[in-house]
């Protein structure tokens, strides 16, 4: 008997296979079929037998372009995120990512105009207060099962609540931000104080004593205000309101409750200080605190990187304290959250969720996720993912971040409900009217509450 072996390679285009399935023709697949042919010589009879040995399928993914929109529009924030996206594209050569970034005040208008024009991005990073309206409008895609499983397993109940509306989780929680009283240690020491104010009465005293004026003009304000920015006005107000024992809206969303004696005491703190020229509304941004034009500010933790790089008296002179109370209340910081979501109209939803999941998945056992690394290095925020908090504990352990992390234990989440942004804007408008002397504190809160009740009624 004599045997010979040889190998045949058959090339079959995937287009032929997919055509049978009535689907669109993607990039061809190359299928290699290895066949062994054996020739057996037996006397005067020849028998040939073909035996399949191996089938190998190599799929070439179709090219995909994803557009991502965030509010990290400053160069110091854009570059680190772009580096993460470049890494993903290197790992997934078939994916091209267009990264769009605007400042926070431009984000909601950008989303709205893009939706109206039919050119929405595939992926959004957005403020969770907008989530109910986005979800009700059909804008958001429901995450796939593997994403939902990951979120439920790796985030705290508070973070899950922050990204849930109508019993549906809408995306990956990213950062935790709380408000605390941030102060210039050097200025307080120079004024004779060895500790920050703990009550609203002490806050009033400190505010006036820390203010410096020349020729009737305030040069250094005891407390920086942030007019023109809804969160900069409302979040400090609510932190003081809750710490005084007041409420924002009823738990059942039946009515606004901020037009209360507690709310009035908080608003009168501001207006009294403005009247006495201990606060100048014109000195109104967190950058004024950074540059030494303000001694105190009630602010969120995300501006740590700015303080580290630019604080006038050095980062070591930045102090963080709990929100002052009415004297009998509990210091209660407002907490708000952001999340990654995918547009429901995106033709590339599967690929979009793959990118979002990669951003929020640890790079290795015991390591941080790309998102956790970005939040703690570029932004100074607290990552929502519990494994990131463990992996990055060294970055969260300085005096500044330790105070904010501790505040989360007693923090109160900003209520998330349909019409929430409208209520917030109404309150901002009336608080600013009181600041600038256009209305009394009583009239301002009454008007804001009436408008809030109208909005709540329309969204029942």
Image (cartoon, rainbow, N blue to C red):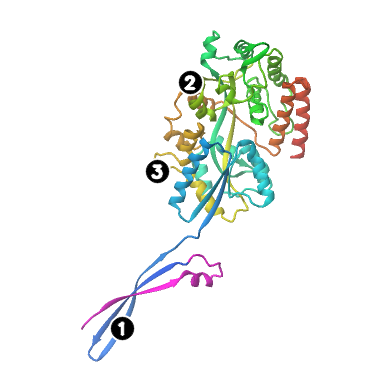
| Residue 403 picture location, percent across and down | 50, 23
- Earlier-in-chain disc, 3 versus 1: 1
Q: Residue at x 70, y 34 (%)?
A: 252
In the rendered image of this protein, does residue 20 appear above or below residue 362? below
Residue 144, can we see it? Answer: no
Mark 2, residue position: 314
Q: Check whether the beta carbons of the residues at disc 3 and disc 1 lie within 8 A of each other.
A: no
- Earlier-in-chain disc, 2 versus 3: 2
Q: Residue at x 42, y 29 (%)?
A: 394
Q: Which residues are magenta?
A: 1-27
Mark 1, residue position: 48
Mark 3, residue position: 364
Residue at the extreme top of the image, as rendered: 192
- Earlier-in-chain disc, 1 versus 2: 1
Does residue 56 appear to the left or right of 382 in the view shown?
Answer: left
Nearest the eye: 260 or 79: 79
In the rendered image of this protein, does residue 247 appear above or below residue 120? above
Q: How many numbered marks have been drawn onto this rendered protein structure?
A: 3
Name the mark nearer the viewer: 1 or 2. 2
Cα separation between marks 2 and 3: 36 Å
Which part of the image, by quadrant, shows the C terminus?
A: top right
């Amino acid at each position: 008997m004599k045997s010979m072996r040889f190998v045949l390679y058959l090339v079959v285009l995937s287009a032929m296979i997919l055509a049978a399935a009535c689907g669109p023709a993607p990039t061809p697949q190359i299928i290699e079929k290895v066949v062994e042919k054996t020739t057996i010589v037996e006397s005067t009879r020849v028998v040939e037998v073909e035996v399949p040995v191996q089938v190998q399928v190599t799929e070439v993914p179709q090219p995909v372009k994803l557009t991502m929109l965030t509010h990290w529009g400053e160069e110091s924030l854009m570059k680190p995120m772009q580096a993460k996206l470049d890494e993903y594209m290197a790992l997934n050569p078939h994916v091209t990512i267009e990264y769009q970034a605007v400042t926070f005040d431009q984000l909601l208008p950008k989303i709205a105009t893009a939706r109206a024009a039919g050119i929405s991005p595939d992926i959004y990073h957005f403020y969770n207060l907008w989530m109910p309206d986005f979800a009700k409008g059909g804008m958001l895609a429901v995450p796939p099962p593997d994403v939902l499983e990951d979120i439920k397993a790796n985030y705290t109940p508070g973070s899950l609540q922050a990204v849930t509306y109508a019993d549906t989780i809408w995306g990956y929680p990213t950062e935790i931000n709380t408000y605390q009283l941030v102060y210039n240690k050097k200025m307080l020491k120079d004024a004779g104080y060895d500790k920050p104010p703990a009550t609203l009465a002490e806050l009033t005293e400190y505010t006036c004593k820390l203010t410096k004026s020349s020729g009737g003009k305030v040069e250094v304000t005891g407390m920086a205000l942030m007019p023109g920015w809804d969160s900069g006005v409302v979040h400090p107000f609510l932190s003081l309101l809750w710490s005084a024992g007041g409420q924002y809206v009823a738990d059942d969303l039946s009515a606004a409750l901020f037009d209360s004696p507690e709310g009035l005491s908080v608003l009168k703190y501001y207006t009294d200080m403005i009247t006495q020229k201990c606060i100048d509304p014109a000195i109104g941004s967190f950058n004024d605190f950074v540059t030494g034009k303000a001694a105190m500010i009630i602010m969120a933790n995300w501006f740590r990187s700015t303080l580290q790089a630019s604080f006038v008296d050095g980062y070591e002179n930045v102090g963080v304290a709990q929100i002052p109370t009415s004297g009998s209340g509990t210091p209660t910081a407002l907490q708000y959250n952001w999340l990654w979501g995918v547009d429901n109209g995106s033709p590339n939803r599967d690929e979009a969720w793959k990118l979002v999941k990669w951003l929020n998945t640890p790079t290795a056992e015991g390591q941080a996720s790309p998102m956790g690394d970005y939040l703690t290095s570029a932004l100074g925020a607290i990552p929502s993912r519990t494994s990131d908090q463990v992996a990055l504990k060294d970055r969260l352990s300085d005096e500044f971040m330790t105070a904010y992390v501790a505040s989360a234990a007693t923090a109160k989440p900003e209520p998330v409900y349909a019409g929430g942004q409208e209520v917030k804007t109404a309150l901002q408008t009336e608080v600013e009217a009181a600041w600038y002397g256009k209305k009394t504190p009583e009239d301002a809160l009454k008007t804001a509450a009436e408008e809030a009740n109208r909005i709540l009624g329309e969204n029942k």
